[in-house]
Image (cartoon, rainbow, N blue to C red):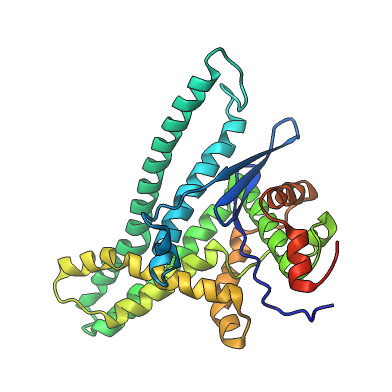
Amino acid sequence: MKKRRKDHYSGIGGQAVIEGIMMKNKDRYSVAVRQPDGQINVALEEYDSFAPVKSLNNIPFVRGVFNFIDSLILGTRTLNYSARFYEEDEPVGSSGTDEGQKKEVSGAASNIVSAITVIISIVFAVGLFMLLPYFLSQFIRRWIVSDTIIAILEGVIRIAIFVLYLVAISCMNDIKRVFMYHGAEHKCINCLESGLPLTIDNVAMSSRQHKRCGTSFLFFVVFVSVVLFVFIRVDDPVMRVVARVLLIPVIAGISYEIIRLAGKTDNIFIRILSAPGLMLQKLTTREPDDDMIEVAIVAVDAVFDWREYLQREFGMEY
């Protein structure tokens, strides 16, 4: 039996959707949704990266930008897919004489809606987390002349807005169920990376916090932006705003490398760096019930040979 380490990287990741979970492994992803009739529907698809050349996804700091865009696109696509199971007018799998044509039109329309949603999400996030803190910090300039202190205060405001946003959405009833599925997703990955087979009992006792979570990534985006804007100074007020927008790809690239490193190592420095993001995950995850865990296991099974993984990483047969 191989000696267990604390850094058994599985490479799989996922996202909670409406009454279900998306799991992604390399270029394949699955979406498992608990239908209104109680059955679990599983869709398996291939995903082509937004990057114009696949080799860009292997370049440090550059890959983080495309990974972030891919996450937004895939997340929106799978959320829209899961929502169709709970639309009253036309449920998934409805039959008709022109079913193939309808699916083609529906798919094209869905892609357009997804693209618009992604653009709106980016604009909203930039306005709320990047520009609003800057404009709020400028009101303090009449009392404080130090650019360093102003930059630090802007960072504090940015972190406060981010935390308040998470607190606000975590109080919404519909979001609470999504966060329960989010917890099930984390528990599945933690279960495997701890060397345990995917059973409902094993998953249930696993942690619902994970260092590679999107919540942690967003925290690093906020944190890295605070550090960068303390050192990057621009005199012109208009160019300050422009700089905050233009530096977003740089911030995303750095944040991705940090969270990628956190997912593969477990030293004291990484644990300290990951601690704030893990604390915030207490807001964005909830303890799932057994039915939700079952959905998560089905989603993992569809794209990941976890038995082979446990054999390779832990030398165990299941």
Residue 187, image x and y in percent? 71, 61
Residue 232 vertical placement versus 221 (above, below): below
Q: Is residue 29 above or below residue 187?
A: above
Tell me which corner region of the image, top left, top right, bottom left or bottom right, holds residue 199.
Answer: bottom right
- At 22% from the left and 65% from the top, the residue drawn is 241
| Whole-percent x, y for residue 32 in the image | 67, 43
Residue toward you, 131 or 189: 189
Question: Compared to 230, does 125 lie above or below?
Answer: above
Residue placed most toward the observer, 175 or 301: 301
Give the residue drawn at x 61%, y 18%: 95
Q: Position of residue 260 (x, y in %)?
A: 53, 71
Identity of the residue drawn at 52% across and 59% down: 166
Does the rendering let one see residue 161?
no
Residue 203 lies in quadrant: bottom right
- Position of the C terminus, as image quadrant, is bottom right
Q: Residue furthest left?
A: 236
Would you say 144 lies left or right of 58 here? left
Which quadrant of the figure contains the N terminus? Answer: bottom right
Q: Return the x and y of residue 298 as percentages of the image width and height.
A: 73, 47
Q: Is 31 left, or right, of 108 in this rendering?
A: right
Image: 273 above or below 278: below
200 to the left or right of 47: right
Indicate the quadrant where residue 198 lies.
bottom right
Q: Nearer the viewer, residue 185 or 312?
A: 312
121 vs 39, left or right, is left
Q: Residue furthest bottom?
A: 268
Q: Is residue 8 visible?
A: yes
- The number of callouts visible is 0
